[in-house]
Amino acid sequence: MSGSVFLVENVFSTLQFPAHVVSASSAAVDMEAFRVANGRRWRRDRWSPSVTGDAWIRVLCDQPRYVSMLAMDGHNLAGFPVRLEISNTGFGGEAYERPIDVTVPAVSTPGALEDPAGVLSEDGQWLARLPVGTMAWGFRLFIPAMGGGLIPEITGLRLGRTWDLVLRKPFREDGSRPVAESTRSSAGWAGRTQVVPTKEGQLRVELEGFHEYDEARYFQSQYELHRPTVFVPDAAQGDRATIIANQDNGVIAFGFEPGDTSYRVATIPYEEHEAPLP
């Protein structure tokens, strides 16, 4: 196991960063740019341009932000080229650096986050590590014309810095709970709504040094607010990524265990965030 990855930060989220400005080349009715990172996974909560041709969506930050991973939850870009561009002048026409310039994989296959084209997860997310973490004032996802009258559709665009660590055993990465509303008639007949398996569990974390505590505290400050978080149990198996959030009334506290002289440990409760329908 090569290590686990959490992505709780999202520079495209104006909920998380109210001073950031998100805009797009164009936007269809009720598919404005801000919807691309509003934390919902419903297909209608998406950004989509109003016209065909080249399209882009960008964020201008209130200060330089460090990013190391890009993720798209729902999208129709499998098999199409995309590129991430960065700028420190508000995209004023300079030659932009393009840390990601790839074609999104067409199908989900086992792969690592560091694969050149990223990886398409089992539930359709596309995730890609930047070759080198980058700090900039502005970031833009550019999609060349798709052709055939197609336009991009993106739900849950995420870009930020990851928290990388090795989970402490034992832990459950595939625990699930079926969710449905059920009722029983006076005659004993049972009925229920569609059953949706929802992942949930607890993850054990042990920091490897005192220097990791500041990063852990930042993660805690965002995660305890129920920020949707990309979770990859094993970076070498990026196709198993899912989106989690803190459980209701979930408590995270980094501390020292009795009689333990190692570094701080914590338990991270989680449940799948708005599990997609099967």
Image (cartoon, rainbow, N blue to C red):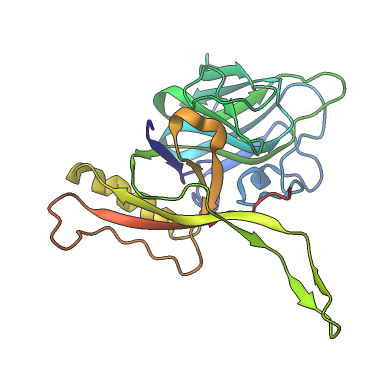
Res. 162 visible in picture: no
Q: Residue furthest top?
A: 95
| Image vertical order of residue 23 relative to residue 269, above or below | above
| Image vertical order of residue 45 relative to residue 100, above or below | below
**Residue at horizontal 87 percent and vertical 20 percent from the top:** 148
**Residue at horizontal 53 percent and vertical 20 percent from the top:** 100
In the displayed structure image, the side of residue 260 where residue 225 appears, left or right: right
In the displayed structure image, the side of residue 209 where residue 244 appears, left or right: right
| Image vertical order of residue 165 relative to residue 251, above or below | above
Q: Nearer the viewer, residue 92 or 31?
A: 31
Residue 166, position in %: x, y?
33, 40
In the displayed structure image, the side of residue 268 where residue 47 appears, left or right: right
**Residue at horizontal 60 percent and vertical 33 percent from the top:** 121
Residue 145, position in %: x, y?
76, 19
Residue 64, position in %: x, y?
40, 35
Q: Nearer the viewer, residue 13 or 197?
A: 197
